[in-house]
Amino acid sequence: MGTEGAFTSAARATTKVLRENSSALLTVLSAVVSDPLYKWNVSTAKGRQLQRDVSSIEENEDDSVTSFNKKPPENNATLSIVESDNDAATRAVARIHEKLKGYEEGTLGEQQTIEGQVRFLINEARNADHLSSIFIGWGAWI
């Protein structure tokens, strides 16, 4: 049956439910974005750099104060990572909001109907350029 039939029907029904309940979904996502304990986009390289920055600051502090009495340093590297994390989260939620309204990249800014959006996403997924960049471990040829 390929992408026609049950797959397309399920995708349309899912898209319809997501669009009808988009406000509830966005409310939950905004709570995740606002959670100060959740880190967005901290790569391994950024984490290592932040550790090095904190370590160098701690080494330069007065050693007469015991380590458990020290206040964690607030430096520019820490603040910039927190700010960029929040920006990344906000951009991600904004992009989800656009998709829930039916706006997709590559549609020239036109709002798509449910059927149009499902068809567009299926065609994008079947695009050979996109298939060549998927995770090799997925094993689509098996």
Image (tube, rainbow, N blue to C red):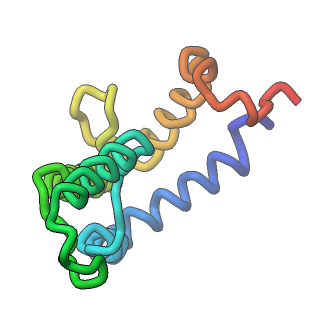
Q: Is residue 127 above or below residue 29?
A: above
Residue 98 visible? The answer is no
Residue 141 visible? The answer is yes
The quadrant holding residue 64 is bottom left
Q: Residue shown at 43%/49% (left/top)? A: 114
Residue with the most extreme right position: 142
Q: In which quarter of the image is the N terminus?
A: top right
- Residue situated in front as seen by the camera: 19 or 78: 78
Q: Give the percent coordinates (x, y) of residue 49.
A: 32, 43
Q: Residue shown at 60%/16% (left/top)? A: 128
Q: Residue shown at 18%/49% (left/top)? A: 77
Q: Is residue 102 above or below residue 14?
A: above
In this figure, what is the number of numbered marks?
Answer: 0
Name the side, left or right, on which 10 lies relative to 95.
right
Q: Residue shown at 63%/56% (left/top)? A: 10
Q: In which quarter of the image is the C terminus?
A: top right
Q: Give the percent coordinates (x, y) of residue 59.
A: 24, 56
Q: In this view, does 9 lie above or below 35?
A: above
Q: Give the percent coordinates (x, y) of residue 23.
A: 29, 73
The quadrant holding residue 74 is bottom left
- Residue situated in front as seen by the camera: 74 or 109: 74
Name the side, left or right, on which 134 lies relative to 41.
right
